[in-house]
Amino acid sequence: MKRLFIAAALAVGVAAIAAAQIKRTPSPAGAELYFIAPVDGATVTSPITVKFGLKGMGVVPAGIAFDGAGHHHLVVDADLPPLDKPIPADANHVHFGKGQTETTLELKPGKHTLQLLLGDQIHVPHDPAVVSKKITITVK
C-alpha cells in the first residue's frame, strides 16, 4: 500500500512538472486568424470546403519552430480547448500539421460551429492565442 501511495505521488509530481514546463510561443501583435470560406451564417452542402486565412504570421508544419509562425487547428462543434496545454486531436479538434490552409469536411445536416486556433510546433496555442471568430453554418 505504501509503494502504491509513493508511486501515485511521484506520478502527480511528474505531471505537475511537465505541465509547468510548457512555455507558450509568443505571437506578434495584430496577428489575425479568420475564415475565407465558408462565411458566418452560410447554408452549405456537404462536403464543405473550408479555407483558412491568416494575417501577420506565417504557416509552417508542426515540429518546426519558427518565430511568428504556426499551423492551423479547426475546432468543430466545440468550445476552445485550454490555451495553456497542447490542443487535443479528436473529432472536434482537427490538426493541420502539414501546414495546410484548407480542407474538405463531411458534416451531417444541421447547424455546426467552426473556429480556428493556431498552434506552435508542439500544438500549443500561442501567447496571446491566435484564434478566429466562431462561425455558424447550416448544412442542408
Image (spheres, rainbow, N blue to C red):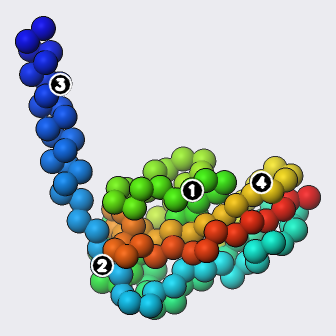
Give coordinates of residue 124: x percent, y percent. Answer: 36, 63
Which label number is shown at residue 110? none
Q: How far apart are marks 3 and 1 (CA)?
A: 31 Å
Q: Return the residue at label 3.
A: 8
Residue 72 visible to an observer of this rendering: no
Q: Determine the residue positioned at 52% across, 59% down.
A: 80
Q: Distance between the residues labelled 3 and 2?
A: 34 Å
Give coordinates of residue 133: x percent, y percent. Answer: 61, 74
Where, quadrant-wise, is the N terminus in this rendering?
top left
Q: Earlier in the sequence, mark 4 or mark 2?
A: 2
Q: Distance between the residues labelled 1 and 2?
A: 22 Å
Q: Earlier in the sequence, mark 3 or mark 2?
A: 3
Give the amino acid at mark 1. Answer: Asp
> Is label 4 or label 2 in front?
2
Q: How far apart are marks 4 and 2 (CA)?
A: 34 Å
Instruction: Assign a secondary structure to mark 2.
Output: loop
Q: Return the residue at label 1.
A: 79
